[in-house]
Image (spheres, helix red, strand yellow):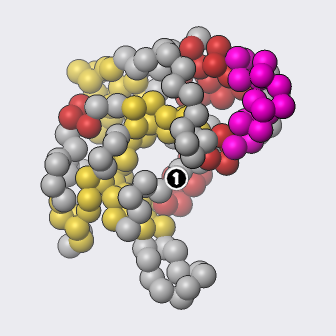
Amino acid sequence: MKPDQSNNISCTKNWPGLSSRNTLIIRVDRCDFGIKSTPIEYSGRTFTPKQEAHITVFGSGLGTHLQQMFTDNSLVEQQVKQAFENTDWCYSKTHDLRHLVRVNNELTGVDKTEESIIMRLEMGGMTEFYTKLKKLGLIHKDHPVPPPHVTLYTRNCDLGIGVHSETELIKLTSEHIDKPV
C-alpha cells in the first residue's frame, strides 16, 4: 500500500460518541476523496456515491458490546473516550483502491450481490486504539483490527460492506483498481 504523502490529513481528537447504530466513526470530507455527486459506471454496473463519507473505527457488533458495558459502568465510557482522544487519528490516503463484493443470496435465493469501491488508508491510530482497548480488558486480545478505509461508492448496499479484519478484506476483494474511478 503506497501512501500519498501529499494527502496527509489530520482527524479530530474529539470523541464523536457512538452513532445511533452503535458504531464509532470518524467523518471525513467527501471532496477530499474525490467522491463524485452522481453515480459512476464501473465494470458495466452503476455505483452510487456515498453521501456521508467516514472511517469506521468499529462496527455495531463491538459498539453494542461496549454500549452495554457503558450502561453497566459509566467509567468504561470515560476510558474509551480517553483512549480515543489520546490516539493520533492522522491518516494518509493511498493509491490502494479496491472493488469489494459480497454475495447475499443464502436466505432468499435471490441474488442481491453487494459491492463497494473503497480507498485504503495508512492510519496507525487504528491499531493504537485497539491496543488500548485490549489493555483495558474491554475487548479480547485476539480481536482483529479493521483495515482503515473510506467507502467511496456502493451498489446494493447504501451503507457499504462492513470489513472487520484484513482476512475479511482479502476475501471480499474482487479486484484492485489501478486508476481513479
Q: Is residue 86 left or right of residue 153?
A: right
Instruction: State yes or no: residue 102 in magenta.
Output: no
| Quarter in which the N terminus is drawn | top left
Q: Which residues are magenta?
A: 64-79
Residue 136 in the image: state x and y as whole percent. 79, 22
Q: Nearer the viewer, residue 121 or 47?
A: 47
Quarter assignment of residue 127? top right
Q: Is residue 76 magenta?
A: yes
Q: Is residue 67 left or right of residue 169?
A: right
Tally of numbered discs = 1
> In the image, is 101 to the left or to the right of 72?
left
Q: Quadrant of residue 15?
A: top right
State whether residue 126 is above or below residue 61. Answer: above
What residue lies at 59% left-to-right and 19% top-to-bottom?
A: 84
Eyeballing the image, is 55 above or below 102?
above
**Element type where label 1 sits in the image:** loop
Q: Residue at x 84, y 31 (%)?
A: 72
Q: Position of residue 56 (x, y in %)?
A: 50, 39
In this picture, is 12 found above or below 122? above
Q: Residue at position x 22%, y 67% from top?
A: 46
Which one is in front, 63 or 175? Answer: 63
The residue beneath circle 1 is 162
Residue 36 location, x and y as percent?
17, 47
Most foreground residue, 162 or 22: 22
Residue 98 location in percent, x, y?
Answer: 36, 52
Chief secondary structure of the magenta portion? helix
- In front: 6, or 50? 50
Residue at left 29%, top 47%? 51
Classify residue 39 by image quadrant: bottom left
Look at the image and tell me whether residue 139 can be seen. no
Instruction: Name the amino acid type tagged 1.
Output: Gly
Q: Residue furthest top?
A: 86
